[in-house]
């Protein structure tokens, strides 16, 4: 159930009954030489669509550009400052609330967005627009641990498997070796416990973390199904909550 595919007359009918909306948020940024720049927003959108198929939740148009300046040296990466993403999301949420729908889940596909989205959610709560951030890989750590053999938080086995399940035609297996040989074993670069890797290029020449070669369609499907199930379950909980359970608490006496 996607808002962008409806006429305004259809939207009037749907918004009159909808309980929760999903806003996929991602990025357009490098994901190694083997994955598309749209990996994060494609993943967020797919998870939202699958959750909607389960529970009938309203899916809003995907936001494809996020907080990605740390990938800026890699060609094609786009980004906005954190405050721009925060304010844009708040504007979308207010527009949605003007139509009577005040429960919103931000389906986040990019770690760099998380702080800005959480700040937006905190501010919107003060306006009685109840917004929550669903970070899909944080929601299913046990499943990821069972399915994914290697490490690598960015463009590694996990994201490659997911993209094989979503859009295999966009994955370039012939570039796996290059991605792995020039990758980093983990995100960042620390000296005496202090993070000194501000940009991805400070620690990974390919833009990849880990080895994508163990990725399979089957692994990606398991991850997507688990993420969509968990999102659907959260939406069911949110739909059942009365406003007084979600509103900010009053000042202490």
Image (spheres, rainbow, N blue to C red):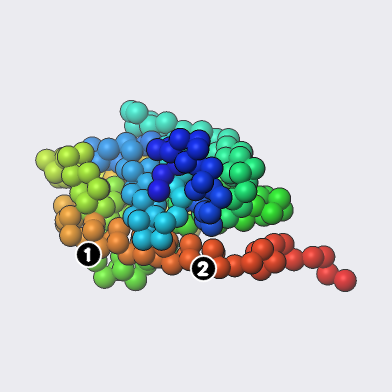
- Seen from the viewer's position, the closer of residues 155 and 109 is 109
**Residue named by callout 2:** 237
The answer to whether residue 114 is visible is no
State the residue at coordinates (36%, 61%). Answer: 54
| Number of residue marks | 2
Residue placed furthest toward the right: 253
Above or below, 36 against 190 in this view is above
| Residue 227 screen position, x and y as percent | 36, 61
State the residue at coordinates (50%, 38%). Answer: 9
Tell me the quadrant of the picture where the C terminus can be found.
bottom right
| Residue 211 screen position, x and y as percent | 21, 52
Determine which of the numbered discs, if any, sits on residue 149 in the image: 1
Q: Secondary structure at mark 2?
A: helix
- Seen from the viewer's position, the closer of residues 169 and 241 is 241
| Residue 35 screen position, x and y as percent | 25, 41
First along the sequence among labels 1 and 2: 1
State the residue at coordinates (32%, 64%). Answer: 226
The answer to whether residue 163 is visible is yes
Q: On the rendered structure, is 121 left or right of 135?
A: right
Task: For label 1, count other residues whose C-alpha is less than 10 Å away and answer few (under 14), some (14-19) or many (20+).
Answer: few
Above or below, 224 against 34 in this view is below
Determine which of the numbered discs, if any, sits on residue 235 in the image: none
Residue placed furthest toward the left: 174
| Residue 164 screen position, x and y as percent | 20, 49
State the residue at coordinates (27%, 56%). Answer: 158
Q: Secondary structure at mark 1?
A: loop
- Seen from the viewer's position, the closer of residues 102 and 7 is 7
Q: Quadrant of residue 147?
A: bottom left
Task: For label 2, count other residues whose C-alpha is less than 10 Å away and answer few (under 14), some (14-19) or many (20+).
Answer: few
């Amino acid at each position: 159930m996607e808002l962008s595919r409806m006429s305004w007359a259809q939207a009037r009918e749907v918004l009159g009954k909808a309980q929760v909306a999903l806003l996929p948020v991602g990025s357009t940024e490098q994901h190694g030489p083997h994955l598309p720049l749209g990996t994060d927003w494609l993943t967020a959108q797919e998870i939202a669509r699958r959750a909607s198929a389960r529970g009938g939740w309203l899916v809003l148009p995907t936001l494809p550009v996020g907080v990605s300046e740390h990938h800026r040296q890699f060609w094609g990466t786009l980004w906005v400052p954190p405050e721009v993403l925060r304010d844009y999301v708040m504007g979308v949420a207010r527009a949605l609330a003007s139509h009577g729908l005040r429960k919103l889940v931000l389906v986040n596909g990019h770690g760099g967005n998380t702080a800005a989205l959480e700040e937006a959610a905190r501010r919107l709560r003060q306006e009685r627009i109840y917004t929550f951030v669903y970070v899909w890989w944080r929601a299913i750590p046990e499943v990821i641990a069972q399915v994914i053999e290697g490490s690598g938080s960015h463009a590694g086995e996990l994201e490659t498997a997911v993209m094989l399940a979503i859009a295999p035609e966009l994955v370039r297996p012939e570039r796996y070796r290059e991605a792995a040989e020039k990758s980093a074993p983990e995100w960042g670069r620390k000296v005496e416990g202090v993070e000194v890797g501000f940009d991805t290029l400070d620690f990974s020449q390919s833009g990849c973390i880990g080895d994508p070669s163990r990725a399979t369609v089957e692994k990606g499907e398991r991850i997507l199904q688990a993420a969509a199930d968990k999102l659907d379950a959260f939406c069911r909980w949110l739909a059942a909550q009365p406003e007084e359970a979600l509103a900010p608490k009053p000042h202490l006496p």
